[in-house]
C-alpha cells in the first residue's frame, strides 16, 4: 500500500489498488489471512511541505524564515 500511495503522489492522480491476502499468486500482498481488498487512493492537497528534524539554532532560523514567508 505504501508503494502504491507513493506512486499516486508521484503521478499526482488517484488510483485503485486490488490485492489478495495471500503470500503467492497474482495481486498477493504477503499475508496469510485470506480474502481480498480494493483500496481507493485519493491525491489532494499537494502543497509543498518543510520538515525540520531537530531544534538547533540552524533549524530555528529556518523555521522563523519559513513562517515569515507564510510557508
Image (cartoon, rainbow, N blue to C red):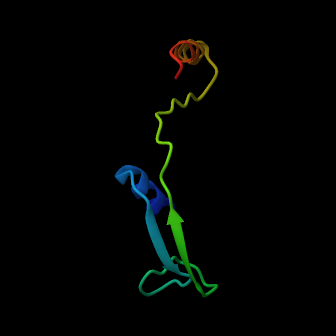
Relative placement, left or right, of 54 versus 25 is: right
Q: Which residue lies at the image location 61% right of the left edge and 87% below the top edge?
A: 34
Q: Quadrant of residue 61?
A: top right
> Does residue 25 appear left or right of residue 53 in this picture?
left
* Residue located at (51% from left, 29% from top): 50
Q: Residue at x 57, y 17 (%)?
A: 67
Where on the picture, by quarter, is residue 52? top right
Which residue is pictured at 58% across the width and 13% down the height?
64
The one of 8 and 56 positioned closer to us in this rendering: 8
Residue 37 image-quadrant placement: bottom right
- Please state if 41 lies on the left or on the right of 33 as rendered: left
Tally the marks.
Answer: 0
Residue 3 in percent (x, y) is at 45, 61
In this rendering, position of residue 3 left or right of residue 37: left
Q: Between residues 54 and 41, which one lies in front from this camera angle? A: 41
Percent across and percent down for residue 38 are 53, 75
In the depicted structure, whether residue 35 falls above or below residue 51 = below
Q: Residue furthest left?
A: 11
Q: Give the x, y percent position of residue 21.
A: 57, 82
Question: Can you give x and y, in whole percent of width and height, for residue 49 in the image?
Answer: 50, 33
Judge whether 32 appears above or below 70 on screen: below
Please determine whether, in this image, residue 5 is positioned above or below residue 28: above
Amino acid at each position: 500500500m505504501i508503494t502504491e500511495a507513493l506512486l499516486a503522489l508521484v503521478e499526482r492522480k488517484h488510483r485503485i489498488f486490488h490485492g489478495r491476502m495471500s503470500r503467492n499468486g497474482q495481486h498477493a500482498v504477503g499475508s496469510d489471512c485470506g480474502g481480498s481488498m480494493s483500496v481507493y487512493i485519493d491525491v489532494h492537497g499537494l502543497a509543498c511541505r518543510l520538515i525540520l528534524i531537530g531544534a538547533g539554532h540552524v533549524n530555528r532560523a529556518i523555521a522563523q524564515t519559513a513562517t515569515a514567508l507564510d510557508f
